[in-house]
Image: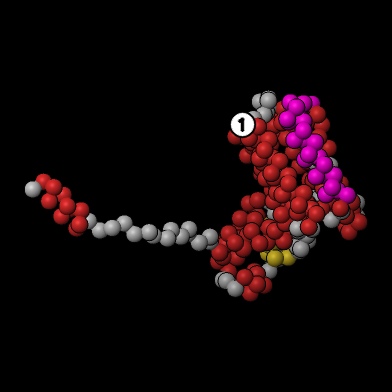
């Protein structure tokens, strides 16, 4: 009797069906913010360029609420500014602001690589090598968006090795503020090739536990982007260092 009851119970139980799990759709405002951010990174939107809400609504086929949320997120990142009676613009950093940000970035990034426990695990080295292969392939194909993202990931992995969450977060926040000047350096093939070689040398220094060499490479690696941006800024707007732009 026990066996028969169990059989009937099993027969009555519904069979499990395979259900396709769909990820929640990304909010429209997040998609818009990412697209505008990528345009800024690639130099498609220039410093001081107006971001007209109506134009963006038409471009993204959406309403002002989504556009305003997107611009608000970009403003928090430091990529967008607001001018009274004019609305949102692509933030144009002055040479002084760029020098100040990069001075702090240099100290924090050198602090991070100086705190990395050595030797570094083989799995972490392999992860960096994979990101660098992606970066090199993107340079070769002229895919500047992948160049940007793979470069960003490469440095996030390196600085993440220090294990200091506050330091990592601060480095990320400062890097965001200068996303808009990346395109100025990436416009020159020799600068991209230098960045590629720097990455290879950083991996080698990590693999061989050469901390001082890694710190020197970190400092050098930061130089091309601000130099290219400041040179272009002064060509366009003169050498007067305005407080805001």
Q: Is residue 59 left or right of residue 42?
A: left
User: To which residue does mark 1 refer?
Assistant: 163
Residue at 77% across, 30% down = 205
Asked if residue 22 lies in the magenta stretch, the reply is no
Q: Is residue 94 left or right of residue 234?
A: left
Instruction: Report the front residue among 225 and 132.
Output: 132
The quarter of the image holding the C terminus is bottom right
Main secondary-structure element of the magenta-colored stretch: helix
Asked if residue 203 lies in the magenta stretch, the reply is yes
Instruction: Report the front residue among 228 and 195.
Output: 195
Helix, strand or loop status at disc 1 = loop
State the image coordinates of residue 167 (x, y, percent, origin top left): 65, 34
Magenta residues span 190-212
Rendered image coloring scheme? secondary structure
State the image coordinates of residue 165 (x, y, percent, origin top left): 60, 34
Residue 47 visible at all: no
State the image coordinates of residue 11 (x, y, percent, origin top left): 20, 57
Q: Is residue 142 above or below residue 161?
A: below
Residue at 66% across, 25% down = 117
Q: Is residue 146 above or below residue 121?
A: below
Q: Is residue 3 above or below residue 87?
A: above
Q: Is residue 141 left or right of residue 67?
A: right
């Amino acid at each position: 009797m026990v066996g028969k009851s169990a059989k009937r119970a099993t027969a009555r139980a519904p069979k499990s069906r395979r259900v396709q799990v769909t990820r929640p759709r990304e909010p429209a405002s997040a998609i818009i913010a990412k697209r505008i951010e990528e345009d800024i990174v690639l130099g498609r939107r220039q410093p001081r360029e107006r971001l007209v809400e109506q134009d963006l609504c038409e471009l993204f086929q959406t309403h002002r609420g989504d556009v305003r949320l997107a611009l608000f997120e970009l403003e928090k990142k430091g990529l967008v500014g607001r001018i009274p009676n004019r609305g949102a613009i692509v933030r144009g950093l002055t040479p002084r602001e760029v020098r100040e940000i990069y001075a702090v970035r240099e100290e924090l990034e050198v602090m991070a690589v100086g705190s990395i426990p050595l030797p570094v695990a083989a799995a972490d080295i392999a992860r960096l090598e994979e990101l660098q292969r992606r970066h090199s392939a993107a340079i070769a194909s002229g895919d500047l968006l992948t160049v940007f993202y793979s470069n960003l990931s490469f440095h996030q992995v390196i600085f993440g090795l220090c294990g200091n969450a506050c330091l990592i977060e601060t480095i990320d926040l400062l890097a965001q503020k200068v996303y808009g000047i990346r395109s100025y350096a990436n416009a020159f093939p020799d600068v991209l090739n230098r960045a590629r070689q720097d990455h290879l040398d950083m991996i080698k220094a990590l693999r061989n536990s050469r901390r001082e060499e890694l710190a020197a490479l970190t400092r050098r690696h930061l130089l091309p982007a601000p130099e290219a941006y400041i040179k272009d800024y002064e060509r366009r707007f003169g050498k007067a260092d305005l407080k805001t732009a």
